[in-house]
Amino acid sequence: MSFGSKSQQMYMLIDTGSSNTWVFSSQCQSSTCSIHNTFGQEDSTSLKTTAETWQLSYGSGTVQGIVATDKIAFANYTVNMGFGLALNASDDFNNYPMDGILGLGRPTSGQLGSPTIMQVLQSQANLPQNVVGVHLNRAADGTKDGEVIFGGVDTSKFSGTLSYTITSNDGAWEIPVDDMFVNGVPTNFTKRTAIIDTGTTFILMPNKDATALHSLIPGSVASGETFTVPCATNAKLEVRISGKLYSISPKDYVGKPSGSACSSTIVGHQAYGETQWILGDVFLKNVYSVFDFDGKRIGRSITSSKFRVF
């Protein structure tokens, strides 16, 4: 995305887990800012800063700063909007390549006091639809065809008719989950919900749920919140949502080597409530995601062998 009058390029993490948009400020004194692109007055004659402060906490660190406004250009759009300028960031961000976060969460999750990017696009760019379509590519496949559509859906990424699941609340992209299966065997989870979050790498669920799931994967071993699975496992993992099954490929749930096995990317960490999961990129690489802001729903469809749509 290009920020300001001089079109400073900033690489942004697409985050459906929150609606806050921010970038590292050139005035940031944290060591993490020195290894990222930054943005400030020297990069734009149209940048306006305020005295309003903010602080955000993520599973991967904390960041704080001030609110600013300027021109932002990306895709086919150029808008003026408020966003955060990060003046301090924890060292956790040393491990991530992005220069900021583009918040595509529900508007009620915003903490900067400014209209969200989707609200700004609606008012300034006349979006055809108030939706976002996301396709995450899988590095192991070497496709490099990841794509985000603002205001529509790319039908070339899937086949079939979209159906929808209404979200459980207005605060997050959270939907009911029926159950999970390993090699066709149900875990018998009930009354679970999942936050669909492009900003989370793994699948997170309370430890008791993660333990029950891994107990059905032959050869898995527990170690606190984390688990290992055989590196060559081909156990079939599926999530059932609104009566339809969605597979999670071993390419995604089998992680890096760990001793004689491999780390599982399904982690027993309770981020929120006892019945709440986060289905992050490990899941999303297997589906095409449609986030419908006006309809308060997430679209899905059974697709071709290459793609599933969620």
Image (cartoon, grey):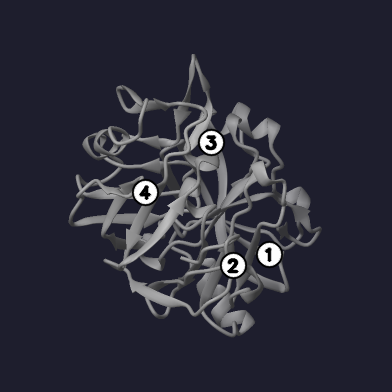
Label 1–label 4 contact, CB within 8 A:
no
Label 1–label 3 contact, CB within 8 A:
no
**Hey, what amino acid is under mark 4?**
Ile
Q: Position of residue 233 (x, y in %)?
A: 47, 33
Secondary structure type for disc 3: strand
Secondary structure type for disc 4: strand
Of label 1 and label 3, which has the lower sequence position? 1
Residue at the (51%, 27%) spot, across then down: 231
Of label 2 and label 3, which has the lower sequence position? 2
User: Badge 2 is on which residue?
Assistant: 81
Label 2–label 1 contact, CB within 8 A:
yes
User: Badge 4 is on which residue?
Assistant: 278
Observer-nearest of 232 and 278: 232
Number of residues whose C-alpha sits closer than 10 Å to that of mark 1, classed few (under 14), some (14–19) or many (20 or more):
many
Secondary structure type for disc 2: strand
Observer-nearest of 257 and 82: 257
Residue at the (50%, 62%) spot, across then down: 104
Between the C-alphas of marks 2 and 4, the distance is 29 Å
Q: Position of residue 38 (x, y in %)?
A: 69, 43
Q: Is 50 situated above or below 206?
A: below
Between the C-alphas of marks 1 and 4, the distance is 30 Å
